[in-house]
Structure formats: structure tokens, C-alpha cells
Amino acid sequence: MVEQEQITFDIIGKVSTPFKEKFAIPRQPGLVGCAKGIVTLINNANNQDLIRGIEQFSHLWLLFIFHGTAQQGWKPLVRPPRLGGNKKVGVLATRSTFRPNPIGMSVVKLEQVIITKHAVEIHISGLDILDQTPIVDIKPYIPYSDAIDNASAGYAQELPQENLLVGFTEEAKESLQVHQHSYPELTQLIEQVLAQDPRPAYKKQSLDQSEYGICLYDLNIRWRLISASQIEVFNVSLAKV
């Protein structure tokens, strides 16, 4: 008997999210509640029968492909951010995006389901997924089996350290007002994303003089540290295409 060495999956959907690049995506789901997105079912999966009854569940598991990093390959050892980016552990002992098979999984909150003549949309929040990520499966989150009270999680047992404070210059506040109509929760989203300190792990706990930028939706948000515990957003503008 010849063992099967490859398995081919069909993409059942694409997810639209605020995150246009890998930098600043939350490192785990649920950390940024204002991060909202839409899973749109496609091809043969664009059928409302596939999700009949899904509204009974408050949360869903999304299984997806790390399409933004898959072409970069993988290594057996990686440096988890939770260990400061200085200690190597086996890739299968982490949630690194650089894996033998670029498969990711995230638990997200189900906000609503919208069915139109042409599309089935699953609106979600608390996501940590790159925009246009291919979805290969969706499963309901089952609290009694998926949440194990006495589970141990090694170096990631506890919640991340205390969040940074995020402030805005007057110029940034004025720009936010311009975009508030298109993105009503933009200020809260920026605060929640930057509070996680998206800088490389080795720079955490240090006062860094660099200026940084993140892309959310079609916007470029420029920011810097003004103390070891506080971030200042100084510019919000349309991203250059």
C-alpha cells in the first residue's frame, strides 16, 4: 500500500480584515476586540446550507493558510516572541506562522451572518488574521471540550504583560475625525493594536527612538515611543498605493 504524501484542500472562503501587512497583527486571537472582519464563502462553499445553525454558537474556529509567509519556507527551530525572541524552541512547540504546512487556526467571535442573493458572509471579531487570508474550514467553538481548565501552556501560561498606554497628537486626532465616518471604531482599534507593542520582541521593555508605521484598512498610522510605557500616534493618513 502506497502512503499518501500530499493532501489538497479547497479554499472555502476569504476573510477581509483591517490588517494589510503582517506587522502589528495581534499575536493571538481575542486580544484586540475591535479587530473585525468578514468571512465570505466562495466557489462551491458559497451556499447558505453549509452554515445552517451556526448562529447558535458565540465563537468559531477558523482554519486558514498563512498565505503571507508560506513562500518564505520554514525552519525546525524558531524564536517565540514570548521568550523575548532570544531562545529557540521547536516550531511545533509554537504558533509560528513559518510551519512545515502553513496552516493557522484562530478562535473568533461570531457577530452576525448576512446572506444575500450572491454571497454568504460571516461577520467576526477578535481576529488576528491578515487580510484576504484563505479559509479552509470553519468549526464551532465548544466550551466544554475546547476550554480545559487545568491545562498547562509552558512559556505562554499567562496573559501578555501589561499593555502600553496609547496617546494621540492633536494632528492625529484631527485626522481621525476625518476617517471616523468610514471607520467608527478606528481610534479604539489603533489603541488596542498598539497597546500590544507590535515591535520585535527583543525591543520590548526598551525606549526605542525609531518611528514606526502600521497599515489598518487603507490607512497608514505613524507612531513612536515617548516613554518605556507609552506610545504616541502622530500621523494618520491614506496609505500610498
Image (cartoon, rainbow, N blue to C red):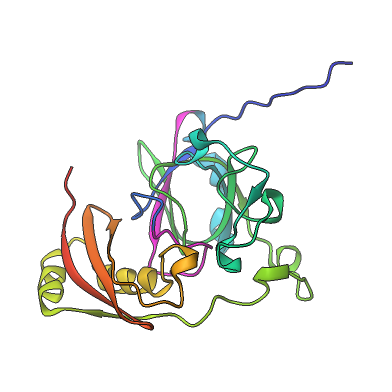
Q: Residue sitting at 11 percent across and 79 percent down?
A: 170
Q: Position of residue 184 (x, y in %)?
A: 24, 68
Which secondary structure is most common in the magenta stretch? Answer: loop
Q: Is residue 178 left or right of residue 52?
A: left
User: For the view shown, which residue lies furthest in the right direction?
Assistant: 1
Quarter placement of the C terminus: top left
Q: Is residue 26 left or right of residue 180?
A: right
State yes or no: residue 41 in magenta. yes
Relative vertical location of residue 91 with respect to residue 146 in this rendering, above or below: above
Relative vertical location of residue 78 with respect to residue 49 in this rendering, above or below: below
Q: Position of residue 128 (x, y in %)?
A: 47, 58
Say which of 60 and 176 sits in front: 176
Say which of 238 and 80 sits in front: 80
Q: Quadrant of residue 158?
A: bottom right
Q: Residue sitting at 76 percent across and 70 percent down?
A: 148
Say which of 219 and 39 sits in front: 219
Relative vertical location of residue 94 with respect to residue 229 in this rendering, above or below: above
Q: Is residue 183 left or right of residue 61?
A: left
* Residue 70 visible within the image: yes
Quarter placement of the N terminus: top right
Q: Residue sitting at 56 percent across and 67 percent down?
A: 84
* Residue 180 visible within the image: no
Q: Position of residue 16 (x, y in %)?
A: 37, 48
Q: Residue sitting at 29 percent across and 71 percent down?
A: 209
Q: Quadrant of residue 203?
A: bottom left
Give the magenta range.
24-43
Q: Count the marks: how many?
A: 0
Q: Is residue 185 left or right of residue 180?
A: right
State yes or no: residue 47 in magenta. no
User: For the view shown, which residue lies furthest in the top direction?
Assistant: 1
Q: Position of residue 76 (x, y in %)?
A: 68, 44
